[in-house]
Image: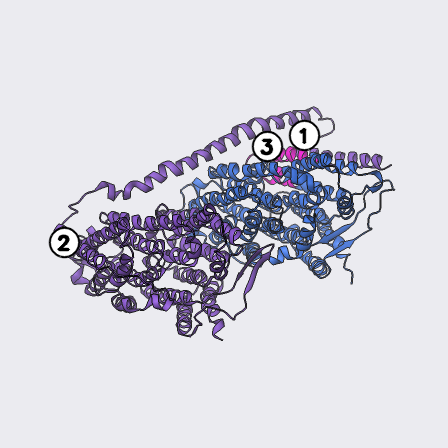
């Protein structure tokens, strides 16, 4: 029986999404509970599976064939090894809390049926990635996750900015998926299989170095898109146009870490090439630092958190690059708790301040929203890796592995300094001092359905460090512990609070003005000016050539000739296309018949 | 039980519908019911094909001794089966989206039925003469529809289509005649069963094969809008009334690809292999050149026209893959593209009917104003940019896997084409659907699809896209033996 549990876990949310779309759409009072119940069902199923599954992940349930032809065997056989079971529990658990939170957050939205249907679609697609047993089915759900992200970011149709952000997210991901697809094709042609279970056995084949490197880098591209790493990170901050529960679930806790999850699945391929692994490690190290710097100068509460997400995912990516997936997964789990918590708290602030997102227009929220203030501090301590809160334990495991890589250590530990800095800045500006706007003056806590999920997440954010994640996965690296990484990272993280405290204690406006950071290193502008402009320039060139040369001269020229010939033959026809065409065809057919007859005779 | 008789019935039912309409029956209802009724022989015939692999009606061909060397015989095998179904479904839904109370309503619906019947005839004909003629017959009502009921520069577009497609057909005809004449006199036949057998046993010499292959490529290629013979397509589709665009882009255009699979690959296999580098070059033009050009379109219907022509490049990639996976992918993508193009053009038709324009600049806010239309718009866009779960993705992934070993660079080009088409489509969806309604459109008059009568064609096409996307085996399964025979040495 338990063999079928993954199917149940996977299909319940799909069933809910389809049911709402086809039938329940006009009745939000039924549609919303259906979606929550489906998510609850998946969560309970995952809990049962978490303890009951076989350690190997072998599945007795039959596979569903999708395409099986000419060397390609792509189907859906769900894989429930410890990694998938852990991830499924995490995804459904966090999703359940976000569903409940959304009951309050979206209570007044007239389109909430659609919101919950899209949320269910997301849970389905994400679980598909989690349980995928081969690269093609992972790619399929990968794209479906992209679709649900697109739909949810663009949820508020009336906002043109939401449409733009949704497009950006989808298109940037598509660029990553271009590489991912080529990587999958490469892996298939080198190793002759796309199944994860077979991959680890077959990687010993002596494939040329360039081929495995190219394949690994192609697969990495998929991760760069979905997990928003350099140079494809630009969509994540913009995705904050979506409703805050979406930012919390998709763009902080679950969807964006799918890239890391995928890298763990294809690690046997990546490890064949030291070049690939180093690239991954360095992209990770740089991406811990750069977004942390940018976050120091952002004013939108959700964008600050979005940049911190970029930075935190980079720790996981770096862990993969260092060949230690266990700590990477550990950090993935703790991060899901505290980052989801921080976003829900930010949502609570925005909800309480009637849609205000600029921290400089808040202030004094500590008195008005004491619970939100408290959980924000919990999340902040976890994010800044201050012991004994969860984030400390998971980050420490990653820092320990950088002991012989000074460059990586420097980047990632410095990032810790700035993380503390911008988080304290956010708290001081938003919660302390006096209210700086009318909205902030009338701030209030949300209803219980919003408070309870935050409370649960806060408990996990504090104690989540005790979860034996790496042991459960069987990925505990045997490494010596170096005290200096622990102390140095801890000192830097704590030191980050000091300048923030002195600068922002009573600041009416930002005392620091760093245009380079406010402009996010001008990456967006660079892409817009160079890449998009090049692409549109090529488009204009092709279009102009098509319009003027091909259609204008060649085609119209021949048309004029034919038409004037038609004018000359007015005796037998009226100059109309249809008559002309009919005569033309009948004539041709007659001619052919005659030719063939002559040939045959 | 031999159900061979169902094949001529497939052609006679639409014919009866046309006669009834001409005699004064209510045009839309008659057309709709006859095209729905046609699904019945469709089911019977496909049942037979699925059981025994093929189904034939009419005299088997002997070497030509009579006055005319052609036989009216019909046949259906795994290769024609999916295309017959594509035709049946798209004809039915295209008539379903047709308008009532327009000028010359009788002729309008007769034309639509005729396109469907002509396409069916072409896909079912065993004799190459009828194969060619049925397609020509189906082209005439296409020109008529564009010329009489079209939008914009309809007469120019109709002229361009006529001249291009006629020239293409002429080249094709020369190729077919050349093939016929290249055979030894005793072996001459126009029956594709006989031809394929004869030419497998005694292949033509290489020079003749290459010559024929080039002629067939140009001929069929023009009909499928292969670059550089494509420029009739975008404007033609932009000017055509929605049902005509659905039928031509969705169904009739597939005739060219079907012809390559039916004639060029089995009859001049070495010639086709020799010119596959040319095909590779030209399909790059389709994907990159038309893909970039599609980014700049300001009119939604033009955009769909470009995007429809662009995706043909990926199908051609499948045709030169030389693997059964690639060919099966090409067939699946033909069906997928047919359905998604039909859905796209029908949505575009509804949008311009309700707002009076298809200029992206003048539109906006549809998602709020017409959520159902937005839903189907999104499905059409997502299908065309290869979202998994919809038919096009299944075809594309098979083509990519099937061509990867032989043509990795072309696969990369085609995969980049997916990105380009995503950019073009999503930009269009954004300006159609998001934000406020543009002041250029009177918002009060814009209504959503409502009632089963308006929604069903969209729902049927969407369901078909999902079914094929989830179970591509339905398309490539029956065709597999035919495709494998194509690749036998």
Res. A96 image quadrant:
bottom left
Dot in front, 3 or 1: 3
Colour that chain A carries in the picture: purple
**SS at mark 1 in the image:** loop
Dot in front, 1 or 2: 2
Disc 1 marks which residue? Answer: A575
* Label 2 – label 3 distance at C-alpha: 74 Å
Query: Few, some or many C-alpha atoms within 10 Å of disc 1 (few <14, some 14-19, many ≥20)?
Result: some
Please name whichever residue, B448 or A309, is drawn nearer the observer in this view of the structure: A309
Please name whichever residue, B357 or B345, is drawn nearer the observer in this view of the structure: B345
Circles 2 and 3, Cβ within 8 Å, touching? The answer is no
> Do marks 2 and 3 share a chain?
no
Circles 1 and 2, Cβ within 8 Å, touching? The answer is no
Please name whichever residue, A376 or A289, is drawn nearer the observer in this view of the structure: A289
Res. B164 image quadrant:
top right
Instruction: Specify whether residue A203 is painted magenta.
Output: no
Chain under disc 2: A
Disc 3 marks which residue? Answer: B156
For the magenta stretch, what is the residue range? B142-169
- Chain in blue on the image: B
Disc 2 marks which residue? Answer: A498
**SS at mark 2 in the image:** helix
Chain under disc 1: A
| Chain-order first, disc 1 or disc 2 | 2
Residue A560 disc label: none
Chain under disc 3: B
């Amino acid at each position: 029986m338990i063999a079928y549990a993954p199917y149940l876990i996977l299909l319940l949310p799909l069933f809910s999404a389809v049911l709402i779309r086809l039938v329940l759409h006009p009745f939000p009072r039924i549609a919303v509970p259906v979606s929550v119940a489906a998510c609850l069902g998946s969560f309970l199923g995952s809990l049962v599976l978490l303890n009951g599954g076989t350690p190997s992940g072998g599945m007795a349930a039959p596979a569903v064939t999708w395409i099986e032809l000419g060397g390609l065997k792509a189907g859906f056989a769900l894989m429930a090894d410890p990694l998938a079971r852990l991830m499924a529990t995490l995804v459904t658990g966090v999703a359940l809390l976000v569903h409940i939170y959304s009951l309050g957050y979206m209570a007044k939205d007239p389109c909430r049926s659609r919101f919950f249907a899209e949320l269910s679609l997301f849970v389905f697609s994400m679980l598909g990635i989690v349980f995928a047993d081969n690269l093609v089915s992972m790619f399929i759900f990968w794209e479906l996750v992209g679709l649900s992200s697109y739909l949810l970011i663009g949820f508020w149709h009336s906002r043109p900015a939401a449409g733009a952000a949704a497009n950006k997210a989808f298109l940037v991901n598509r660029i990553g998926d271009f590489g991912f697809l080529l990587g999958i094709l490469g892996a298939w042609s080198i190793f002759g299989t796309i199944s994860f279970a077979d991959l680890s056995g077959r990687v010993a084949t002596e494939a040329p170095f360039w081929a495995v490197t190219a394949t690994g880098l192609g697969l990495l591209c998929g991760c760069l898109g979905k997990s928003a790493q350099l140079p494809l990170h630009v969509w994540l901050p913009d995705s904050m146009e979506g409703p805050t529960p979406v930012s919390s679930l998709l763009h902080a806790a679950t969807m964006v870490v799918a890239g890391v999850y995928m890298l763990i699945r294809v690690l046997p391929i990546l490890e064949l090439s030291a070049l690939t692994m180093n690239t991954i490690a360095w992209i990770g190290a740089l991406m811990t630092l750069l977004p942390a710097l940018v976050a120091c100068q952002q004013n939108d509460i959700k964008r600050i958190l979005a940049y911190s997400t970029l930075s935190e995912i980079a720790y996981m990516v770096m862990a993969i690059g260092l060949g230690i997936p266990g700590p990477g997964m550990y950090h993935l789990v703790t991060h899901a708790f505290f980052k989801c918590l921080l976003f829900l708290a930010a949502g609570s602030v925005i909800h309480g301040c009637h849609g205000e997102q600029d921290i400089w227009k808040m202030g004094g929220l500590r008195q008005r929203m004491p619970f939100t203030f408290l959980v924000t501090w919990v999340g902040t301590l976890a994010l800044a890796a201050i012991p004994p809160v969860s984030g400390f334990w998971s980050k420490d495991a990653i820092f320990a592995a950088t002991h012989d890589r000074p460059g990586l250590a420097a980047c990632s530990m410095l990032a810790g300094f700035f993380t503390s800095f911008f988080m304290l800045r956010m708290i001081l500006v938003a919660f302390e001092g006096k209210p700086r706007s009318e909205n902030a003056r009338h701030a209030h806590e949300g209803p219980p359905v919003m408070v309870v999920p935050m409370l649960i997440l806060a408990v996990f954010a504090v104690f989540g460090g005790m979860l034996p994640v790496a042991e459960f996965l069987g990925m505990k690296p045997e490494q010596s512990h170096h005290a200096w990484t622990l102390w140095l990272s801890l000192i830097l993280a704590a030191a980050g609070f000091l300048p923030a405290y002195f600068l922002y204690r009573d600041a009416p406006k930002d005392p620091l003005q760093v245009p380079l950071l406010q402009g996010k290193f001008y990456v967006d502008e660079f892409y817009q000016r160079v890449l998009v402009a090049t692409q549109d320039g090529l488009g204009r060139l092709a279009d102009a050539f098509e319009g003027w040369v091909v259609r204008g001269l060649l085609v119209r020229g021949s048309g004029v000739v034919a038409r004037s010939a038609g004018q000359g033959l007015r005796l037998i026809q009226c100059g109309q296309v249809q008559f002309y065409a009919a005569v033309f065809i009948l004539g041709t057919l007659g001619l052919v018949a005659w030719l063939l007859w002559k040939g045959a005779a | 039980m031999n159900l061979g008789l169902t094949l001529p019935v497939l052609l006679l039912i639409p014919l009866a519908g046309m006669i009834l309409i001409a005699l004064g029956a209510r045009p839309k209802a008659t057309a709709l019911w006859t095209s729905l009724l046609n699904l019945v022989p469709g089911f019977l015939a496909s049942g037979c094909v699925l059981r025994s692999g093929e189904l034939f009606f009419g005299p088997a061909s002997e070497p030509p001794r009579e006055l005319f060397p052609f036989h009216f015989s019909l046949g259906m095998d795994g290769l024609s089966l999916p295309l017959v179904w594509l035709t049946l479904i798209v004809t039915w839904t295209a008539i379903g989206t047709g308008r009532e109370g327009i000028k010359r309503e009788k002729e309008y619906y007769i034309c639509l039925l005729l396109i469907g019947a002509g396409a069916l005839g072409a896909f079912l004909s065993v004799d190459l003469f009828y194969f060619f003629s049925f397609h020509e017959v189906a082209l005439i009502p296409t020109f008529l529809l564009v010329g009489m009921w079209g939008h914009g520069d309809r007469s120019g577009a109709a002229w361009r289509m006529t001249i291009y497609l006629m020239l293409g057909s002429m080249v094709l005809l020369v190729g077919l005649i050349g093939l016929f004449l290249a055979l030894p006199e005793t072996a001459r036949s126009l029956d594709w069963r006989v031809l394929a057998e004869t030419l497998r046993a005694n292949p033509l010499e290489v020079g003749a094969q290459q010559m024929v292959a080039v002629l067939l490529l140009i001929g069929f290629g023009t009909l499928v809008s292969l670059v550089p013979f494509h420029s009739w397509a975008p404007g033609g589709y932009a000017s055509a009334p929605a049902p005509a665009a659905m039928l031509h882009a969705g169904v009739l255009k597939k005739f060219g690809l079907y012809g390559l699979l039916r004639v060029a690959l089995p009859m001049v296999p070495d010639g086709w292999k020799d010119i596959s580098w040319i095909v590779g070059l030209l399909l790059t033009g389709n994907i990159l050149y038309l893909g970039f050009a599609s980014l700049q379109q300001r009119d939604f219907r033009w955009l769909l026209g470009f995007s429809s022509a662009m995706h043909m490049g990926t199908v051609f990639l499948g045709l030169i893959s030389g693997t059964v996976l690639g060919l099966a992918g090409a067939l699946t993508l033909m069906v997928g593209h047919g359905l998604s193009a039909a859905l796209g053009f029908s949505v575009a038709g509804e949008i311009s009917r309700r707002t009076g324009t298809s200029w992206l600049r003048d539109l906006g806010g549809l998602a709020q104003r017409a959520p159902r239309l937005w839903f189907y718009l999104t499905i059409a866009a997502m299908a065309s940019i290869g979202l998994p779960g919809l038919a096009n993705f299944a075809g594309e992934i098979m083509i990519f896997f099937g061509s990867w070993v032989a043509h990795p660079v072309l696969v990369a080009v085609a995969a980049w084409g997916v990105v380009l088409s995503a950019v073009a489509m999503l930009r269009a969806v954004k300006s159609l659907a998001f934000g406020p309604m543009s002041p250029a459109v009177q918002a009060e008059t814009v209504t959503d699809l409502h009632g089963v009568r308006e929604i069903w064609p969209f729902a049927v096409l969407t369901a078909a896209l999902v079914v094929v996307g989830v179970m591509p085996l339905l398309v490539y399964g029956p065709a597999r033996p035919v495709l494998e025979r194509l690749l036998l040495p």
